[in-house]
Image (cartoon, coloured by chain):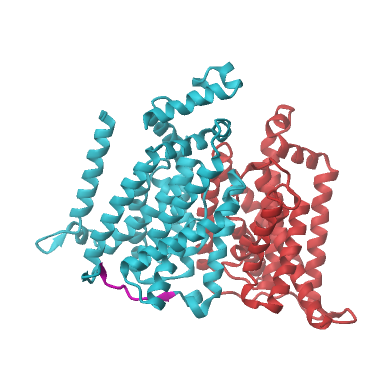
Amino acid sequence: MNNRQKQGYIAAIAAVVLLAVLPLKIGSHSVLSLMHLDVSILSEMLLFAIAAMSVNLLLGYTGLMSFGNAAYFGLGAYGAGLSIHYLNMNFIEGAIIGTIVALLGGLIVGPFLLRRRGIYFALLTLAFGQVFYFIAYRANEFTGGEDGMSFPRPYFGFPGWHTDLHEGSFYYLMLLVFAVVLVGFWLIVRSPFGRTLQAIRQNELRVRYLGLDSNKFIFVALLVSAAMAGLAGALYGLLIMFAAPLMLDWQQSGDFVMIMILGGAGSIWGPVVGSLIYVIGKDIISTLTQTWQIYIGALFVICVLAFPGGLLGTLLNSIARRDVGAPISEETVPHKAWESGAPASSAAVAAEQKES
Amino acid sequence: MLSNVAPSVFNGLILGAFYAFVAIGLSLIMNLTGTINLAHGSFLTLAGYLAFTLVSKGTSFWFALILAPLLTVVVGVAVERLLIVPLYKRDPIFSLLLTFGLSLIAEEVYRLIWGPNGVPFSAPGILGGGISLGFMQFPTLRLFIAVVLAAAMVLLALFLWRTRFGLRLRAAIQDTEMISAMGTNIQLLYMVNFALGMALAGLAGVLASGLLGLSPTMGNALLMPAFVVAIIGGMGSLFGSIVGGLLVGLAISVTTLFIPAANEVIMYILMAVVLLIRPRGLFGTEGLFG
């Protein structure tokens, strides 16, 4: 374990402890109530962070511009809502079914998305995301259409033991889920699979020359991303006990991308920081003014413009440098070897694999 | 049967022409600069509202039909020069997010100025009636819209394929660096190209507000189908956008007749089928966008 890893563990533990302590009351006040915030805001923040992490896996790590992850998020919410409403599922079953529905959505859409890259890929995610929006919107006898559907939050538990979740205990459950997802995400991006995704971001052609089927890797990344967004959506549905077509909308996808960019793409903690800024900022602004959408929009514009080197680019570079030891770029690879293709690229990917 | 199907086929074609129009504007901007302009719908709506304000201040509809798109071009180019130009050199995700932020701001601003609900905006009386086509009555307004859209497309095609400037524009799509090295002012190209896109959006906005009703979300409602049309027709092909638009319009109108609940989903099914058979789109250039 090197120094940086140690720092990472300490930061992670400190953050989780801080998040756990925030709602605790000292006397009649907690840090949260002093800030006039509700504990469910924190749950929302954690769930949006998971959704933003699902975008991050595609955009930050694999280099695929996904602008449709709200589709999976909304599918998760509807999956949970419909199964609870019509099939009387309990909390855990609802969350699992929501995740599976989102995963199925990814399975259906994925093969089409795989066919393109770059902004074409972004367009496809944008367009395919809307399919589910229209389905939810149009199947109004089943889903409540435009008005959405509300459903009760079932008890949480296993056979033999169960409890009702109020906002406080819900938050701690979310914190647990979040911690598990975070660790899982960390393991994925550091695994050979995750390294290959990052290699695809840096140079897909070289990865293909090495004999790896990049499409397969991207497809799995899409599915993981869909499942993560679906889990977040299912739990978000259980949090607000509601599912609506707007959760599937491209504007919701935009929010997730923005959260990721706010905190920094390609980093594990970026989406968490971004979600904190976004959710709490939105909550504060929307209590102050009716026209909060203007300020959120302005936040987007400023954030994109105020980092001339690119918040995304700078962070990607620094991450690449820290994770791999040296940035993998054409300059670090001997020119002639690079021209001949295979040997240089195997060196580059080998350097990546060694770290994991 | 004919009297039943023919009107909806015509209506579908006109709706499709709108989609094609918006898609061409989007493609122009996307092809040259890689910017997916999510604010395109907002500019469309802006033109509609500007025309509405002009008409309610007493100008004639015809004057507004010309002036509102021009004003939209001015606003659009100002936005492009100030906000989007700094992003051309960066990853396309940034301009995508910027225009997304702009569309959020615009929607709220329209709500503040013109109210959250639709406003009545109707074309002058001369376009109100119908023209008999023998087997059916056809509303004059729709025919007028079809003629204007078709004329604008022809003008655009003439500009792109029959002028020096259009030649440079098309060359820049192939290789921006090369055309710049040969002495063409690339920033001017970007600006004129964006202005063209805005002009198309503006014209579509004014016409659409007469037909579909003017509300803060009108433009965004046209935006998503336009993306689908651009994908079906093939990125980088204006002709493809036209064919794609008409196809989608036709598919929607026919589906509305028989399975009304599926009339939005049908275009996505169409898109999926096209992607399966021909991933680059019907008339797309392979390799232009990966």
Say which of B116 and A1 sits in front.
A1
Q: Residue at x 56, y 18 (%)?
A: A337
Query: Is A144 displayed left or right of B131 in the figure?
Result: left
> Measured from the top left, where is residue A166 in percent x and y?
23, 69
Q: Which chain's colour is cyan?
A: A
Q: Residue at x 35, y 56 (%)?
A: A281
> Measured from the top left, where is residue A239 in percent x and y?
33, 67
- In the picture as drawn, the residue positioned furthest to the left comes out as A27
Q: Which chain's colour is red?
A: B
Figure quadrant of residue B65: bottom right
Figure quadrant of residue A355: top left
- Whether A273 is drawn above or below A329: the answer is below
Query: Is B254 displayed left or right of A128 in the figure?
Result: right
> Measured from the top left, where is residue B51 in percent x and y?
67, 66
Say which of A160 and A174 sits in front.
A160
* Placement of the C terminus of chain A among the 4 image quadrants: top left
Q: Residue at x 32, y 65 (%)?
A: A92
Residue A200 in sight from this viewpoint: yes
Residue B64 in sight from this viewpoint: no
Query: Is A131 displayed left or right of A46 in the figure?
Result: right
Q: Is residue A178 magenta?
A: no
> Measured from the top left, where is residue A294 in percent x and y?
46, 59
Q: Which residues are magenta?
A: A149-157
- In the picture as drawn, the residue positioned furthest to the front comes out as A159
Q: How many marks?
A: 0
Figure quadrant of residue B224: bottom right
Q: Residue at x 36, y 52 (%)?
A: A275
* Placement of the N terminus of chain A among the 4 image quadrants: top left
